[in-house]
């Protein structure tokens, strides 16, 4: 790193306490308009910065990294995911990449649980009646949904967030099942009463609600393809608060419209911010604007992690949240 205060370019507005602390510590350039960077503006930032602070919606691919300036040595991403950065190319160019894991676990698990409860109980349809002034009054047969307690919840990805979802699900009387590349520790399984399925296909055929909590990697792209989705019961519900690319969104949409799945709660989408127009307006689908981790506390803690990663790196040490090749 240069002897002077490092040039840090931040691609989006961050919470005021985070920006204030960055201004104290670094020569920081804030995106005052908060408009997403165009590809040209991102290339310019990569060419001028010592350290870039992007977000999970900033796609930094091999072509952009080829335009990085000689002083760029750290991409300190603001977010837990890192699939938006070509990490392998960055490392090959001697550019470290960091993220902000851990701080969003409880917030995302809360939102996941909210969708797990809301979709089977038809909360969206009830809200629409009230907001449109169409409620005729209570009726024994109106808006009957499905009881959540006693149902089988399948968790795809039993990492930090998946485990936090399992803890909440147990409290609501759900029977917890999970598929993971590796079986979690026995004490974790015991704490939430979870059953591990080595075969994703077998788990999908047996569950009532699926919660997607795995990261997007080349190995999980369209992991839930048309074939796998068709293994699920027509009464099943899909909830995704992880990454849209894990699900074949076109296949999911076709099945929801055909009644081959009972409903979905989606906070993430395959081509964000674009949403499949055929999903819009479906009464059995609750759509949220990628807000699973959107709490004041979580966003500030993310910024604090970014600052720690930058400061540690500038001081000549390995950042605590460095993305390693083994994680790709």
Image (cartoon, helix red, strand yellow):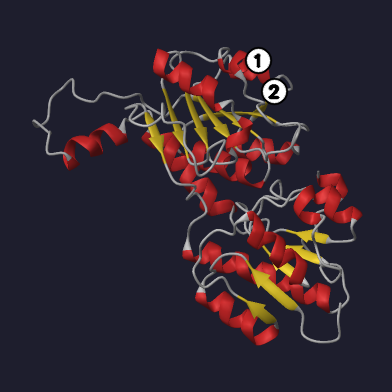
Viewer-proximal residue among 316 and 104: 316
Viewer-proximal residue among 316 and 119: 316
Residue that badge 1 annotates: 202
Q: Quadrant of the N terminus?
A: bottom right
Residue that badge 2 annotates: 197
Q: Do the residues bearing badges 2 and 1 touch, measured as CB atoms within 8 Å?
A: yes
The answer to whether residue 252 is seen in the rendering is: yes
Tell me where residue 315 sits by quadrant: bottom right
Residue density around tag 2, few if under 14, some if 14–19, many if 20 or more, within 10 Å: some
Residue 292 versus residue 121 in the image, above or below: below
Q: Is residue 4 left or right of residue 176?
A: right
- Kindly state the secondary structure of the residue where label 1 is placed: helix
Q: Earlier in the sequence, mark 2 or mark 1?
A: 2
Residue lying at 47% horizontally and 17% vertically, measured from the top left: 254
Give the image location of residue 193, x and y in percent: 61, 33
Viewer-proximal residue among 277 and 218: 277
Q: Is residue 23 left or right of residue 186?
A: left
Give the image location of residue 232, x and y in percent: 54, 15
Give the image location of residue 9, x and y in percent: 67, 71
- Kindly state the secondary structure of the residue where label 2 is placed: loop
Query: How far apart are labels 2 and 1 at the CA level?
Result: 7 Å
The answer to whether residue 77 is seen in the rendering is: no
Residue 230 versus residue 55 in the image, above or below: above
Q: Quadrant of the C terminus?
A: top right
Residue density around tag 1, few if under 14, some if 14–19, many if 20 or more, within 10 Å: some
Tell me where residue 124 sits by quadrant: top left
Residue 224 versus residue 269 in the image, above or below: above
Residue lying at 55% horizontally and 58% vertically, measured from the top left: 36
Q: Is residue 101 left or right of residue 121?
A: right
Residue lying at 53% horizontally and 42% vertically, measured from the top left: 272
């Amino acid at each position: 790193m240069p002897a002077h205060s490092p040039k840090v370019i931040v691609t989006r507005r961050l919470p005021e306490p985070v920006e204030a602390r960055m201004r104290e510590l670094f020569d920081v350039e804030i995106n005052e308009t908060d408009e997403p960077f165009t590809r040209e503006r991102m290339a310019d930032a990569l060419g001028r910065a010592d350290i870039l602070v992007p977000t999970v919606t900033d796609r930094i691919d091999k072509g952009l990294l080829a335009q990085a300036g000689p002083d760029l040595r750290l991409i300190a991403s603001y977010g837990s995911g890192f699939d938006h950065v070509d990490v392998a190319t960055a490392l090959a160019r001697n550019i470290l990449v960091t993220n902000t894991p851990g701080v969003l676990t409880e917030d995302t698990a809360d939102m996941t649980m909210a969708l797990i409860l809301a979709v089977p109980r038809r909360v969206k349809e009830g809200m629409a009646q009230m907001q449109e002034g169409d409620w005729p009054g209570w009726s024994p047969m109106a808006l009957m949904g499905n009881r959540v307690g006693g149902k089988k919840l399948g968790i795809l990805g039993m990492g930090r967030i998946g485990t936090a979802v399992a803890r909440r699900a147990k409290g609501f009387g759900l029977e917890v099942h999970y598929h993971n590349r590796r079986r979690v520790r026995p004490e974790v399984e015991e704490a939430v009463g979870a059953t591990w399925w080595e075969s994703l296909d077998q788990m999908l055929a047996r569950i009532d609600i699926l919660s997607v909590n795995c990261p997007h990697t080349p190995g999980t792209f369209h992991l839930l393809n048309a074939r796998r989705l068709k293994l699920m019961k027509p009464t099943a519900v899909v909830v995704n608060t992880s990454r849209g690319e894990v699900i074949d969104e076109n296949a999911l949409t076709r099945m929801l419209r055909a009644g081959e799945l009972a409903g979905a709660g989606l906070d993430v989408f395959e081509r964000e911010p674009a949403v499949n127009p055929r999903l819009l307006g479906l009464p059995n689908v609750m759509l949220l604007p990628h807000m699973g981790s959107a709490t004041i506390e979580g966003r500030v803690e993310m910024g604090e992690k970014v600052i720690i990663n930058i400061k540690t790196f500038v001081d000549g040490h390995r950042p605590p949240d460095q993305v390693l090749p083994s994680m790709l």
